[in-house]
Amino acid sequence: MQCPSCQNTDSRVLESRSADSGRSVRRRRECLNCDFRFTTYERVETTPITVLKRSGAKELFNRSKIVNGINRACEKTLVNGSQIEFIVDEIELELNQGIRKEVKTNEIGEMVLSQLKDINEVAYIRFASVYRQFDGINDFMKTLESLKPIKKEQLASVL
């Protein structure tokens, strides 16, 4: 690692710790030439994920778009910011672990819906209405009907 002060390549690591929720390592270093101390970060290099839009256009995966969509769906619900971050972390992790580096928007949308279904039904319906482009009340009713069997099973397990 090159010293930012004198450009010498000899340094020693003083301290290492996990950073960025375990996705990187923060290292505190000291130059062996000039004793200047500096910080470096070590991250795993990942291949960028390309998202195929409905229109056929391609764009790089943008985490903030998912966060914004889930935030809108979760407005005035009991879902908090840490739960939303957890959902997006899980989706991003699954995408990065996948073999394919090109994914369709509908696949990402279904991943979000599967996470929201377990957390909050209102947020699930809101997200589904935008993501699946509901045309009217019939689309809402079909989605609500699909939620009913899950609730019956959950009640049976409680009783």
Image: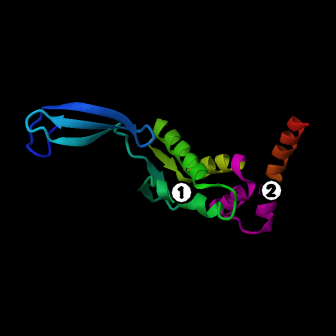
Residue 131 falls left or right of residue 36: right
Q: Nearer the viewer, mark 1 or mark 2?
A: 1
Residue 135 rendering spot, x and y as whole percentages: 72, 68
Quarter of the rendering containing residue 131: bottom right
Quarter of the rendering containing residue 18: top left
Q: Indicate the colouring scheme.
A: rainbow
Residue 50 falls left or right of residue 76: left
Residue 5 falls left or right of residue 26: left
Q: Amino acid at mark 1?
A: Val
Please tell me which residue is depicted at 48% across the width and 36% down the height of the picture.
Answer: 97
Q: Secondary structure at mark 1?
A: helix
Identify which residue, 147 or 89, lies in the foreground.
89
Identify which residue, 109 or 10, lies in the foreground.
10
Q: Callout 2: few (<14), some (14-19), or many (20+) C-alpha neighbours within 10 Å?
A: some
Vertical comparison of 111 with 124: above or below: above
Vertical comparison of 67 with 136: above or below: above
Q: Which residues are magenta?
A: 118-143
Residue 36 falls left or right of residue 126: left
The numbered disc on residue 67 is 1
Q: Which residue is mark 2?
A: 144
The numbered disc on residue 130 is none
Reading the chain from its start, which is encountered first: label 1 or label 2? 1
Determine the residue located farthest toward the right in the rendered image: 159
